[in-house]
Image (cartoon, rainbow, N blue to C red):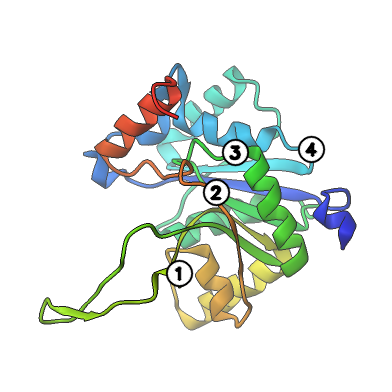
Amino acid sequence: MKQKREGEALTLGAVIVAAGKSSRMQGVDKQFLELEGVPVLIRSIRAFEELGFVREIAVVVREEEIPRTMEMARAFGLSKVKTICAGGTSRQQSVFNGVRTLSPECGFVAIHDGARPFIDPGAIAACVADAARCRAACAAVPVKDTIKLRGEDGCIEGTPPRERLFIAQTPQVFERSLYTAAMENALARGEDYTDDCQLVEALGHRVFLSEGSYLNFKITTPEDLILAQALAAGEIY
């Protein structure tokens, strides 16, 4: 197992998911927006491209964006991008579409949001090491604010202990056989999850929370884009 933690005996395929509709961005395709001349999606892919234990990368986009994405991958010299495929009707289906394209040699799969351009290769490696040890791991950060549970009447119903609450990020890394079994279980039960960890949790397997970064935020709103532009320009750090 030590070999796997050091990445020596581990072969991983990465699935970068960018098939959403960007509804909270007023229809703007956030994954193609440029940050200092580099598209958001390319920044996300590059972090995985740099890692030796990443065998190949599958990128999942809307069908009409496949030609554009292929051209970008060529232009930026992303040699590990082996497949660019169309997403499905949900995130769960989009991820599954990408995982199915990975070669059998990929014993682990890392799933990452294409709209998280500031993921650090070191954080990916740490999450993969945790997954090699536990079969499943997810980058996460502690919540900073006190969280309230709201009842149906609009009033506070409870206050969960903050020290136990974490914000799930990506990558989420799984032993491939575990992910496949979890996906088959979800399909058999007619479940459609928005988070890949939920697939594995529903199978009864625990997921380790790996140390993430607050800079690894997902560009979801126009306000997120303003922050991303400032970070890319080196205006804040």
* Residue 177 in view in this figure: yes
Q: Which mark is residue 163?
A: 1
* Residue 33 in view in this figure: no
Residue 159 lies left or right of residue 13; in this view the side is left
Q: Nearer the viewer, residue 165 or 186?
A: 165
Dot in front, 3 or 1: 1
In the image, what residue type sits under mark 1? Glu
* Residue at image point 42% right, 34% down: 31
In the image, what residue type sits under mark 4? Gly
Residue 62 lies left or right of residue 11; in this view the side is left
Label 1: few (<14), some or many (≥20) within 10 Å? few
Label 2: few (<14), some or many (≥20) within 10 Å? many
Q: Secondary structure at mark 1?
A: helix
Instruction: Identify the mark nearer the N-term, 1 or 2.
Output: 2
* Residue at image point 63% right, 46% down: 123
Task: Say if 132 sits above or below 154 in the image.
Answer: above
Q: Residue 86 at what x, y percent from top left?
A: 49, 46
Label 3: few (<14), some or many (≥20) within 10 Å? some
Q: Which mark is residue 112?
A: 2
Instruction: Identify the mark nearer the N-term, 3 or 4.
Output: 4
Badge 2 vs badge 3, beta-carbon distance below 8 Å? no
Specify the quadrant of the image occupied by residue 37: top left
* Residue at image point 59% right, 80% down: 203
User: What is the C-alpha distance between the residues marked 3 and 4?
Assistant: 14 Å
Circle 4 is placed at which residue position?
52
Q: Which mark is residue 120?
A: 3
